[in-house]
Image (cartoon, helix red, strand yellow):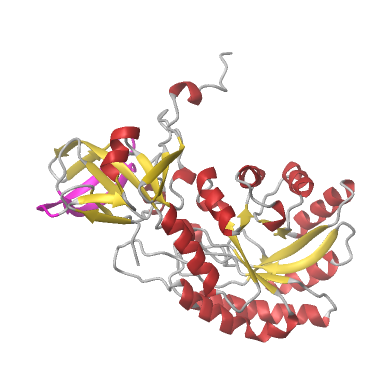
Amino acid sequence: MSVPFDYRSGELHCEDVPLAKIAAEVGTPFYVYSRGELERAYRAFDSALDGIPHRVCYAVKANSTLGVLAVLVELGAGADIVSAGELFRWQKAGGDPAKVVFSGVGKSETEMRAAIAAGIGVFNVESAEEMGVLARVARAAGATVKIALRVNPDVDPETHPYISTGLKANKFGVAMDEARHLLRKAANLEGLEVSGVDFHIGSQLTKTSPFTDAIARLVALVHDLASDGIKLDHVDIGGGLGIDYGKGDTTPPSPAEYGDAVRTALAPLAKLGLTLYTEPGRVIVGQAGALVTSVLFRKRNEAKHFTIVDAAMNDLMRPALYGSYHPMKPVSRPDRPSIVTDVVGPICETGDFFARDRELPELAPGELMWIGAAGAYGAAMASNYNTRPRAPEVLVRGDRYTVIRPRETYEQLIAGERLA
């Protein structure tokens, strides 16, 4: 199997394009994505569910750049969205709104109306109050909308607490013992059609057991609903399958292993003719993307050596926000003596770092550094903090590349502002 980033004659390439060539033409920092890896990862996940009627609804929040979304649209993906803005992006990329599930605990009435007008597939409802508001909005629009109730199975996903979403202490979904009552109520509300049940227990999961434990609780709920006369057409088990960030402490299950576990766990529902919805994000785009940055300076104080680069926490927030690990290496000449260094950016925050006490080949000012596994929650979480333009994004296909989002200009940053 080919890898999206590899060295050829000591120079790091994305597919068949030298990263140094892109840097010379678009400047640093920049995000770069391998189209081939996006396609491979999507197909691996999709084919892992062969034999189960299913729909893969890509989690747009992971990477919402139009050029990336368009690749997934072409592959036949649906979308999991959490805002009207993500619906707008999905449609601009050519996505079918009928393949959209709308998740999230805080949908506004404006967003509900926009989603109804667009004709989305289903709303994942997360509370009794939301259910009542959605029914009222649907009636006012003269529509009947499909809903799935998001349940909270109280399963520990064993991941970072900020991205754990399936415990009873989390804000997401409704308790399992409340779900049956709410769905009986929903079945009698004008404007709503009960279509499914849904859960999403967290992100960057490195075991299949949290998925199978949550599915077991979902299976029991589906059987209870059937005894109430409520016939569903789908179950949604969310996303969350992790990727290998190269730290060496965990090896997430492959899509094939995930698919086998899900197939076994769902077997008790096989005769009900339900479609399985999934909401993968990171596992599709994570390994396909990288952030490339230039070394500006090096310095040493009494306690530390620092490698100061031109990318910053506004470009890639994950290390500052989660303390997350990303693999790093030089774009050229990887075989050289190493040092222990902190890789930091120019922002005036001690939290502006990409790595602490990392053993890396020593890079000189002007050299390029690759920060890998950055395709998910990299560009999507970027900001303009310190009035820094967001980095351009580049999509590589074979020996060619396209700038799918140019670097912002200062004029663009202030275009909507006014003096008092």
Q: Please tell me which residue is depicted at 87% across the width and 46% down the height of the picture.
A: 141
* Quadrant placement of the C terminus: top right
Magenta residues (range): 335-361
Residue 65 seen in the current view: no
Q: Quadrant of residue 228?
A: bottom right
Q: Is residue 356 magenta?
A: yes
Q: Please tell me which residue is depicted at 85% across the width and 56% down the height of the picture.
A: 144
The answer to whether residue 420 is left or right of residue 227 is left
What percent of the width, then of the height, locates residue 410? 44, 23
What percent of the width, then of the height, locates residue 67? 51, 45
What percent of the width, then of the height, locates residue 180? 77, 73
Q: Please tell me which residue is depicted at 55% across the width and 55% down the height of the picture.
A: 72
What percent of the width, then of the height, locates residue 66? 54, 44
* Figure check: 346 above or below 172: above
The answer to whether residue 309 is left or right of residue 92 is left
Q: Quadrant of residue 386?
A: top left
